[in-house]
Image: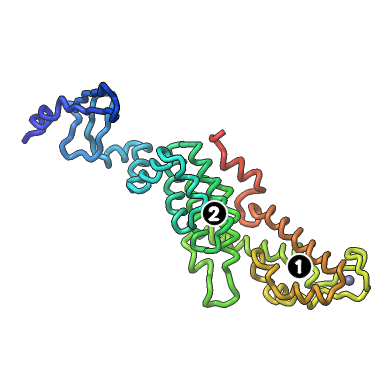
Amino acid sequence: MSATQEDSSRKRQRTDASNGDAEQADTVTVFSDEKHWHSDGSLVIQVENTLFRVHRTMMALNSEIFKDIQSCRNPSSWRNSKDTLYDPPYFSAMHSGTLSATLPVLSSVLRLATKYRFLGYRTECLSISIDISLILGCAQAAAAVINLARETNAYCLLPFAFLVCADAVGDDDKEFIIYRDLPLSYQDKAAALQGLHALTCAQRDRMFPFAYKTPNRDSTDCSTGECRTEGLFKNFVRHSGYSFFFDYYEYDEWLEAEKALCKECFEYVRVTSRSGERYIFRRLPEFFCIGEDWRELHKRQNLGSE
Ligand SMILES: [Zn+2]
């Protein structure tokens, strides 16, 4: 069959669109374009009532928009995004879903929502992503979030994801190593290591200064005058090159310190650690070389969306 013959047989294609209860079906008649219905084309475009069948690679070579479409050929990505459009409870279910089930779906929807500017869906995806980042305990998942955030300009996801990566570093060489184990760009690996260094310095100076030197009595209001804090928190000194951000309050030292210190001194060390924790959280964007502060990240993330 020649192209011309095929064209003429395809002309007068009819598409009937109706809902089940409609008394009168809407009928749309479409025509294939005589010149640009290529029999070996891989992409059909409808403009009003005219169909064009063209080559996807040719379009992608000449158009940034079609190049984007070319890069989003995974049907499941589109299926997930359509689920969010047509099924409102879909997003609600993701808020309570497991990390392994939710992250891949969320990633594909966020990518498409960002690329094709479904701004409301992008905002919703980001709010769920932030929920997820709070429960991240897995550096591999955190690395996936970093890559997703880079791709979609979701800057506010980065600090916490970097923190999870830095926190996974252990003092055993057989354990997790950022440069070996994380599927990140070398720039992001360097940022994770820089952040770990800044984090450990802040831990020493802001969270556990009492582990290095007993604070003066004017600061603590010590009721006995005999409390000594250095030595009570040996682990924070011995492993000062590693993150304690997520689990510092779980160490047995706190139980021993509560027995060894007067009430005022124990309250002092507890409040100091909490205050240092908040300080570190505020400074995470700077620690991991992402931006000056959280405000800047919010501004960059929402650029063009407001
Ligand atoms: Zn005391």
Residue found farthest to the top:
24
**Residue indicated by mark 2:** 132
State how many labels appear: 2
Of 19 and 304, which appears nearest the observer? 19
Q: Secondary structure at mark 2?
A: helix
Q: Position of residue 86 (x, y in %)?
A: 40, 38
Point out the image quarter for the N terminus: top left
Screen quadrant of the C terminus: top right
> What residue would you read off at disc 1?
208
Q: Residue 223's quadrant in the figure?
A: bottom right
Q: Is mark 1 within 8 Å of ligand 1?
A: no
Of labels 1 and 2, earlier in sequence is 2
Label 1 to label 2: alpha-carbon separation: 29 Å
Secondary element at image label 1: loop
Residue in view at x 38 percent, y 38 percent: 64
Q: Is mark 2 within 8 Å of ligand 1?
A: no
Task: Give me the disc on residue 68.
Answer: none
Looking at the image, residue 257 sits to the left or right of residue 71; the answer is right
Which residue is at a point 58% across and 42% down the rendered structure image? 300
In-front residue for pair 6/96: 96
* Res. 234 in view: yes
Q: What amino acid is found at the position of numbered circle 1 in the picture? A: Phe
